[in-house]
Amino acid sequence: MKLLQERFPDGKWEKERTIPEHKERNIPQLRPDLSGRIRGRRVAIEIQASTLTIAKLIKRLTDYTKRDISLLWLVPLREPLGELPFRPRLYERYLHNIYYGRTYYWWAGQGLVIKPVHYGLYETRLRPHGRQRQRANSILAARNRRHLWYATGRVL
């Protein structure tokens, strides 16, 4: 939070600031992990450490949108993303869709650096012969159904 306050000094950044409910507009109380302002625009940052259902994610997105609050959802990492394939969780793939082909990852060791990641299907190339080729093709088809992904992107 200190870095946000230094970068955006007029933002009035706070941790877990309570945003009261609006009964007349049917909006529940909100409590983002971090909230403040960037160039006068209200911003909430959610650091999603636990798995979230798509229904809950949509509900929370709708609640922030009704209040005209911009929302950045970050997925924290225990270690930096490497070049090896991985399987993003369902809510990470949903965030990838709503953020126009990017999921935003944050690793605590990077400070304020956020890595926007685009997923691509990971392909393996096997060159077996004869019966081994048939078996390899069925294994490859099953592997592709499980969708191994790899991260592409650059650090902002």
Image (spheres, rainbow, N blue to C red):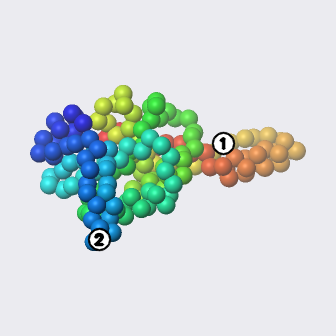
Q: Are marks 2 and 1 in contact (CB under 8 Å)?
A: no
Residue position marked by numbered label 1 in the rendering: 124
Residue at left 46%, top 31%? 78
Work out which quarter of the rendered image holds the C terminus and state it: top left
Instruction: Pick whichever, 79 or 117, lies toward us.
Output: 79
Work out which quarter of the rendered image holds the N terminus and state it: top left
Where, by quadrant of the figure, is residue 84 drawn? top right
In the rendered image, residue 11, in percent from the top left (x then y), is placed at 16, 46
Q: Is residue 48 above or below residue 81?
A: below
In the rendered image, residue 114, in percent from the top left (x then y), is placed at 34, 40
Q: Provide the secondary structure element on which disc 1 rests.
A: loop
Which residue is outermost to the left?
10
Q: Residues within 10 Å of mark 2 (few under 14, many from 20)?
A: few
Which residue is outermost to the front?
23
Q: Provide the secondary structure element on which disc 2 rests.
A: loop
Residue at left 42%, top 38%? 76
Q: How crowded is mark 1: few (under 14 residues within 10 Å), some or many (20 or more)?
A: few
Q: For the residues marked 2 and 1, what is the alpha-carbon distance in whole angstroms?
A: 51 Å
Where, by quadrant of the figure, is residue 88 drawn? top right
Instruction: Pick whichever, 48 or 26, lies toward us.
Output: 26
In the rendered image, residue 3, in percent from the top left (x then y), is placed at 22, 34
Residue 120 seen by the camera = no
Residue position marked by numbered label 2 in the rendering: 25
Type of residue at label 2? Answer: Arg
Residue at left 35%, top 47%? 46
Residue at left 27%, top 65%? 22
Question: In front: mark 2 or mark 1?
Answer: 2
* Count of marks, rendered view: 2
